Amino acid sequence: MRRWLTPGKLIFIGSVLMIASVVVPFLMAIGRIQSTLFLNAAAVFASLAGMIAGLYGVFEIVQARKRRDQDNQFGPHS
């Protein structure tokens, strides 16, 4: 069964959330958008969610490579 949320997509989603969590406060600081409690909280949660999603994607890639290397080390299972 093929998964629709691959580690690469997780890393991409995490990157987008992290960038948004920097851009929104910057726009608030220069006065382009009004600073509200909701936007501040959204920026913090976007940063947290982006970091978690990106790290989870990286951990999945590392785990898959370790599993592949371990299978290659001992040969195919019969």
Image (tube, grey):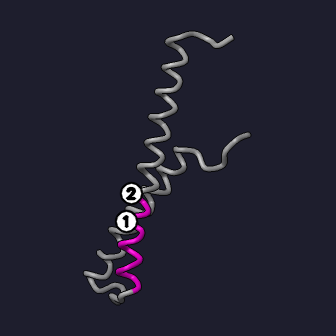
What is the quadrant of the N terminus in the image? top right
Do residues under tags 1 and 2 come within 8 Å of each other at their CB atoms?
Answer: yes
Residue 26: x %, y % from top left: 29, 75
Q: What element carries label 2?
A: helix
Residue 13: horizontal and vertical position, in percent? 50, 57
Q: Which residue lies furthest to the left in this view?
A: 29
- In the image, is residue 67 part of the stretch drawn in magenta? no
SS type, badge 1: helix
Give coordinates of residue 14: x percent, y percent: 45, 56
Name the amino acid type tagged 1: Ser
Does 20 appear above or below 40?
A: above
Q: Magenta span covers which residues?
A: 38-50
The residue beneath circle 1 is 47
Front residue of 12/45: it is 45
Q: Which residue is located at x 32 percent, y 78 percent?
A: 27
Q: Name the residue at 40% across, 71% down.
A: 45
- On the image, the x and y values in percent for residue 74 come to 53, 11
Query: Which residue does the image show at 46% across and 48% down from the upper left?
Result: 56
The quarter of the displayed image where residue 59 is located? top left
